[in-house]
Amino acid sequence: MSKQKQAQLRKSVTPFAGSDKKASIMQLINTLIPFFLTWFLAYQSLSVSIWLTLALTVVAAGFVIRTFIIFHDCTHGSFFKSAKANRIVGTITGVITLFAFDKWKRDHAIHHATSSNLDKRGTGDVWVMTVNEYVEASFWGRMAYRLYRNPIVMFGLGPIFLFLVSNRFNRKGAKRKERMNTYLINASVAVIYALLIWAIGWQAFVIVQVPILFIAGASGIWLFYVQHQFEDSYFENEDEWDFVKAAVDGSSYYKLPKVMEWMTGSIGFHHVHHLSPRVPNYNLEKAHESTPPLQQATTITLASSLKSIRFRLYDEDNKTFVSFKEIKELLRKRKLGIQMTPGKSSFQEK
């Protein structure tokens, strides 16, 4: 795609980049009220059946994901025109989702500015190693990476780490504004949780709140993971990296059933979001449908997305993700001292 066409593509989504105050308020109403109601019903159902409670926590977790999308839009300044309104709503939704507004805003902005750039990995993204990096890594380096990419660790322990560690502590060198926002959200969470435990008891609180957070956290990590980890995803080094190609070819269109699309705030239109982060979530589908070139983005479904679990390493030569199993032979040859031909496929022997 030429630079002129790329510029036209970015310009084509500009009409959808403005927030709609009425639409944003309506989304707050149809997200937060059902969340609190479902949470209360889950608590009340404890006297009926634990299974009914768990079923309701799944629904409540869906509303937490939708709440996070509002938080996410606020960090991009796309939910309201007012920066102050975005900050206030972003901080409130940050308390509900256990995310620190300013901290995540910074990390996520870096993710957008460096997504698919092999030379600028490490902030706000999923850890991706190339085949050559993995082969050259130490035994412990490979073990650490394999552990990180294990589904049980990523989607099982990942939410726990996210909520209890990553989102609770400021980064080294964080500015005062960022640090104070994290402290405010942490203190608010502590007070609210303490009041809830006092009101309903710690057992009831744990049975209701922990499943909600875990399901929402695991689902959120999955959504983020799968929309950048597909077979022919775009990755390039800095000198070849292009923002528009990274957005359209490095992010997928996750085609979900309508109910799930609504619950996830249309984040499945991830290619549109990366092309123009100022497009609020309720305009993403409109932008996609109105812009034919965007409809050519890689489309994945619930079924096809499951294959991404085996995509562990990025092969720079073949421009594709591969599994650990596929590079076993390469590791064996390296151990035997067999050299590889520079510039050729990672799997071609000299």
Image: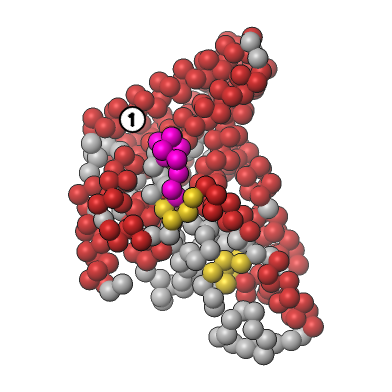
Image quadrant in which the N terminus is located: bottom left
Which residue is at 54% across, 76% downward?
A: 318
Q: Position of residue 84 (x, y in %)?
A: 29, 35
Q: Name the one closer to the observer, 206 or 106.
A: 206
Q: Is residue 265 above or below residue 333?
A: above
Q: Is residue 143 above or below residue 340?
A: above
Dot 1 crowding, Cα within 10 Å, few <14, some 14–19, many 20+: some
Going by the numbered disc 1, the residue's amino acid type is Gln
Find residue 348 and report its image quarter. bottom right
* Residue located farthest toward the left when viewing the structure as drawn: 15
Q: Position of residue 180 (x, y in %)?
A: 44, 36
Q: Name the one closer to the observer, 48 or 244.
A: 48
Q: Which scheme is used to colour this image of the protein?
A: secondary structure
Q: Is residue 39 left or right of residue 154?
A: left
From where the camera sits, is residue 166 visible? yes
Q: Is residue 138 above or below residue 272?
A: below
From where the camera sits, is residue 123 visible? no
Please give the count of numbered marks on the rendered protein: 1
Q: Is residue 136 left or right of residue 93?
A: right
Which residue is at 41% across, 53% downward?
A: 253
Q: Magenta stretch: residue 159 in it?
A: no
Q: Position of residue 154 (x, y in %)?
A: 63, 48
Q: Position of residue 157 (x, y in %)?
A: 66, 43
Disc 1 is placed on an element classified as: helix
Q: Which residues are magenta?
A: 254-262
Which residue is at 66% across, 49% downward?
A: 151
Q: Is residue 8 left or right of residue 232?
A: left
Residue under label 1, please give it.
Answer: 27
Q: Name the one closer to the observer, 138 or 7.
A: 7
Find residue 210 and report its image quarter. top right
Which residue is at 32% across, 58% downward?
A: 294
